[in-house]
């Protein structure tokens, strides 16, 4: 009779769906692991020898530290029997075959907890910790201060010219605050969890699979890789995206940034895509900074080199997260052809930086290819911006010209709109480009 639970667990394990189904095995059951989390016992995390196991053990250690003290009462083993010697020595107590440790599972034994899996699936064990939510006081203070500083800076700069831009920005902030207060906790998608494991592997001394993983891994070396921290960073990036919308509007009509914000965030598909932690919001923020610099910088002779370098760095950051944004520098050079020195520096730095990214991450383009399975919905949700663009072009398209900010956005839309019908990761970027283009075209039509 004592072997019955082990036999049942073995049957469940061997007949469980594939890893891609997102199933996580608990032994003897999930309640046993919850009892461990709710107990007052201390813990020590022992990782396997591989970089990915050490990286995931770092996450497990920091996650448990939010609810339990570190100590020697319970040993938490991370990895599998092939890379964790201590787990291999204890595995017979589970009664399971050794290759079962390659499946994502949480096994609770006497004074021992096993977090098992392989490099391809151990990130699925994040499900076991999903109910834990304990933001530290320092994290909350840092988040609130960051949001306050960003809001204050944009409020001052948008309100100092005497226009209504500052008032509209305050209205935008109130909508942002309402959205934040009414939103449930943001989920971590499976694609992002794979990025998270790669980032933790990089933080543990291994190699990252993508530039985004390398960036996150570098941050995780000084900041704990917790869901609370990731969520706070996500909301900060969203605030920057909202704030920078006002700098995509014409310089003399900053208040029209409220329309850009409205056209973008009123699209259900856009809100859906930015309402989960997926890493794309970092690339979107970098694109917003790039577009804001392109539509606002004058590149004076004394600062042309410094401004061009800054523009190149933010463009490279956007390309690092989404490699399809590599066309932005080319569009810039075509629609702003007057200054050859600036354009040559911009193209040289971005093209050279992109080549370095591809040499460091050969699968960069392949990793970012995510098929858009519902292009019709994208067209429907962007219908207001598209309709506005078509209307303005029909009324006065010949007066748009071929050089300047509006042609830059128009050529960007002409490239990325068709591409986004196949590549879903481009959809948030295209929403922003279409909204900014529609508002600028309307502004130009009103002045004619």
Image (spheres, grey):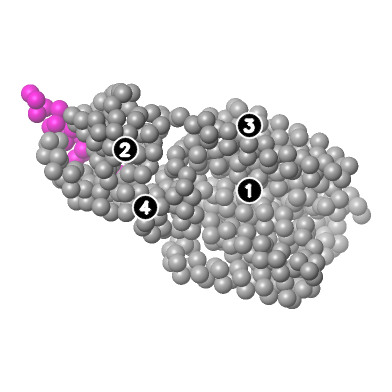
Callout in the foreground (2, 1): 2
Q: Where is residue 434 in the image (x, y as percent from the top left)?
A: 70, 52
Q: Mark 2 or mark 3, which is nearer to you? A: 3
Identify the residue at the far front of this view.
71
Gap between marks 2 and 1 measured at Cα: 34 Å
Secondary structure of the residue carrying tag 3 is: helix
- Local SS, label 2: loop
Q: How far apart are marks 3 and 4 (CA)?
A: 36 Å
The answer to whether the residues at label 3 and label 4 have Cβ atoms under 8 Å apart is: no
Q: Which residue is drawn at 36% across and 44% down?
A: 58
Q: Name the residue under label 2.
A: 23
Locate residue 105 relative to residue 225 in the image: left or right.
left
According to the picture, the residue beneath numbered tag 3 turns out to be: 179
Residue occupied by mark 4: 204
Around disc 2, counting alpha carbons within 10 Å, would you say few (fewer than 14), some (14 to 19), or many (20 or more)? some
Residue 362 position, x and y percent, is: 43, 67
Do the CB atoms of the residues marked 2 and 3 lie less than 8 Å apart?
no
Q: Where is residue 122 in the image (x, y as percent from the top left)?
A: 32, 45
Q: Which tag, 2 or 3, sits closer to the chain's start?
A: 2
């Amino acid at each position: 009779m004592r072997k019955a639970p082990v036999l049942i667990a073995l049957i469940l394990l061997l007949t469980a769906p594939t890893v891609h189904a997102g199933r996580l095995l608990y032994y003897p059951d999930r309640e046993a692991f919850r009892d461990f989390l709710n107990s007052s016992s201390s813990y020590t995390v022992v990782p396997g020898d591989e970089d990915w196991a050490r990286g995931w053990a770092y996450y497990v250690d920091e996650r448990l530290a939010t609810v339990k003290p570190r100590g020697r009462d319970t040993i938490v083993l991370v990895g599998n029997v092939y890379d964790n010697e201590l787990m291999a020595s204890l595995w017979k107590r589970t009664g399971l075959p050794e290759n079962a440790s390659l499946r994502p599972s949480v096994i609770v034994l006497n004074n021992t907890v096993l977090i098992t899996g392989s490099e391809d699936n151990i990130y699925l064990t994040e499900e076991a910790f999903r109910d834990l939510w304990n933001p530290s006081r320092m994290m909350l203070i840092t988040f609130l201060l960051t949001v306050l500083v960003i809001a204050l800076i944009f409020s001052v700069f948008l309100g100092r010219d005497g226009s209504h831009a500052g008032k509209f920005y305050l209205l935008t902030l109130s909508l942002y605050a309402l959205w934040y207060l009414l939103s449930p906790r943001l989920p971590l998608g499976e694609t992002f969890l794979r990025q998270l494991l790669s980032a933790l592997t990089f933080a543990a001394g291994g190699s990252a699979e993508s530039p985004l993983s390398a960036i996150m891994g570098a941050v995780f070396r000084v900041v704990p890789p917790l869901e609370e921290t990731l969520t706070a960073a996500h909301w900060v990036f969203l605030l920057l995206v909202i704030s920078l919308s006002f700098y995509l509007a014409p310089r003399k009509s900053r208040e029209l940034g409220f329309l850009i914000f409205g056209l973008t965030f009123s699209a259900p598909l856009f809100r859906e895509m930015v309402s989960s932690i997926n890493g794309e919001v970092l690339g979107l923020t970098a694109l917003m900074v790039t577009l804001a610099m392109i539509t606002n910088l004058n590149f004076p002779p004394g600062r042309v080199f410094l401004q061009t370098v800054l523009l190149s760095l933010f463009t490279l950051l956007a390309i690092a997260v989404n490699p399809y944004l590599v066309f932005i520098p080319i569009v810039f050079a075509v629609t702003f052809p007057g200054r050859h020195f600036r354009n040559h520096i911009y193209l040289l730095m971005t093209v050279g930086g992109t080549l370095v990214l591809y040499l460091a991450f050969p699968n960069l383009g392949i990793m970012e290819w995510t098929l858009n399975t519902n292009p019709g919905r994208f067209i429907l949700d962007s219908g207001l911006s598209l309709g506005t663009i078509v209307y303005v072009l029909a009324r006065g398209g010949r007066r748009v010209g071929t050089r300047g900010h509006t042609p830059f956005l128009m050529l960007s839309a002409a490239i990325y709109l068709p591409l986004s019908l196949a590549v879903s990761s481009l959809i948030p970027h295209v929403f922003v480009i279409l909204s900014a283009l529609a508002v600028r075209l309307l502004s130009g039509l009103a002045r004619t």
